[in-house]
Amino acid sequence: MFAQESVMEIQNEKEAFERLPLAELAIKSEFVFYNEETNSYWPNGDFCPSDAPETMNFAWEAWQAATTQAVPKGFVLVPQESLKVALFWMHEDIDPWQMGGDSFADLYEHKPILEKALVESQEPTND
């Protein structure tokens, strides 16, 4: 399912996941252990409550699904500051006498896209 992810990416995500209170408790209490071959959590002998591995694996799978869907294919994340800098440059750094020529016509075609992206990045989502 996550074959495209590198081992390092999975390790980084696992470390972030294991800092969640539920995961941290299960691991520190030694209820479960992580199996790298299956990319899942397994019960740790007799000390494990019956639902701990199932709960951990459900949460781990949800965590991985959420992180892989955070940026759909074909999209990239751009910091809001980059958009603000681009808009500032378009408004402030171009002299008015340069606007009349064709050299900046293509640049201003992107202005509505940048403004829309900046507004959308500031709006909360209700997904």
Image: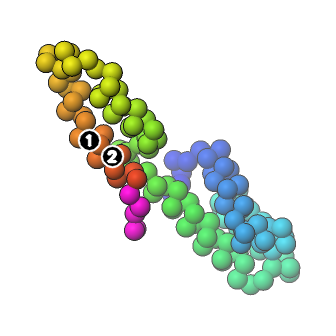
Taking the image as shown, residue 118 lies to the left or right of residue 53, namely left
- The answer to whether residue 119 is above or below residue 105 is below
- The answer to whether residue 27 is above or below residue 85 is below
Question: Residue 6 location in percent, x, y?
Answer: 59, 44
The residues colored magenta run: 123-127
| Residue 37 seen anywhere in this rendered image of the structure | no
The number of numbered discs placed on residues in the rendered structure image is 2
Report the Cα–Cα distance between label 2 and label 1. Answer: 6 Å
Q: Which residue is mark 1?
A: 113
How dense is the environment of label 1, judged by Cα within 10 Å: few (below 14), some, or many (20 and up)? few
Mark 1 falls on what kind of element? helix
Q: Which residue is mark 2?
A: 117
Query: Callout 1, which amino acid?
Result: Ile
| Residue 40 seen anywhere in this rendered image of the structure | yes
Q: Which residue is found at the position 34% from the left and 50% from the top?
A: 119
Furthest-bottom residue in this view: 50
Place residue 125 in its image quadrant: bottom left
Place residue 84 in its image quadrant: top left
Q: Which residue is found at the position 26% from the left and 17% from the top?
A: 95
What is the chief secondary structure element of the magenta stretch? loop
How dense is the environment of label 2, judged by Cα within 10 Å: few (below 14), some, or many (20 and up)? some
